[in-house]
Amino acid sequence: MSLISKLILNADDQLRYLTIGELDSMVRYMIYFLSIDQIISTLRNKENDIIRLASKKIFQLHPEYIAPGGNAAGAKQRSLCLRDYGWYLRLITYGILSGDQTPIEKIGIVGVREMYNSLGVPIVGMVDSIKCLKNATLEILDYNQETKQIPYFDYLIRAIDE
């Protein structure tokens, strides 16, 4: 639920108008949203380019993944890896949109290590994959945009690596 929805529902539950403080919070959120709108649009619109760059980097870093017997050896396995890239990129946008790491924690981290372990995917490979995804976005975004998304990638990397 968005900040604005929470504030409105809270005021309605208490049968009152929004306070000046609550209205100020909404204005600050809208200003924040305007500052991140271009980042979210770029990540969404350039998703395929970002994934292409990231996958090229991860398979250069770990060529054994696409070698016969590797976790991404066949077209099907490789497409599943790339699907995860898109999922993680979307997850990063949720964090940026909310201005909080909570969506990343609640949606993307719970059980992720267990899932990859059960699939036989090396955790070091997942950490490297997210680093490659982060670096690919840095190639696409400008400097001002980079600073808003880096903390969310770093949080995700640390959480997977724990």
Image (cartoon, rainbow, N blue to C red):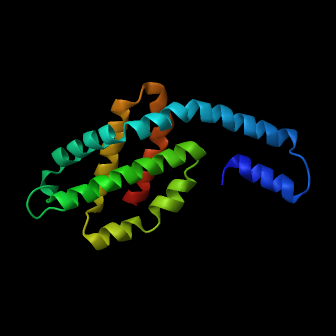
Which residue does the image show at 91% across and 56% down from the upper left? 15
Q: Which residue is farthest left?
A: 68
Q: Position of residue 60 (x, y in %)?
A: 16, 44
The C terminus is located in which quarter? bottom left
Between 5 and 29, the residue placed more toward the observer is: 5
Q: Which residue is farthest right?
A: 16
Which residue does the image show at 14% across and 55% down from the upper left? 66
Which residue does the image show at 91% across and 51% down from the upper left? 16
Between 91 and 114, the residue placed more toward the observer is: 91
Looking at the image, residue 72 lies above or below residue 58: below
Looking at the image, residue 27 lies above or below residue 76: above
Which residue does the image show at 53% across and 61% down from the upper left? 106
Q: Position of residue 43 (x, y in %)?
A: 42, 38
Residue 125 makes an appearance in the image = no
Residue 142 makes an appearance in the image = yes
The N terminus is located in which quarter? bottom right
Q: Which residue is farthest top?
A: 143
Q: Position of residue 57 (x, y in %)?
A: 22, 42
Q: Which residue is farthest bottom?
A: 118
- Left or right: residue 59 compared with residue 107: left
Figure quadrant of residue 22: top right
Looking at the image, residue 27 lies above or below residue 17: above
- Left or right: residue 93 compared with residue 9: left
- Left or right: residue 15 compared with residue 136: right
Between 96 and 49, the residue placed more toward the observer is: 49
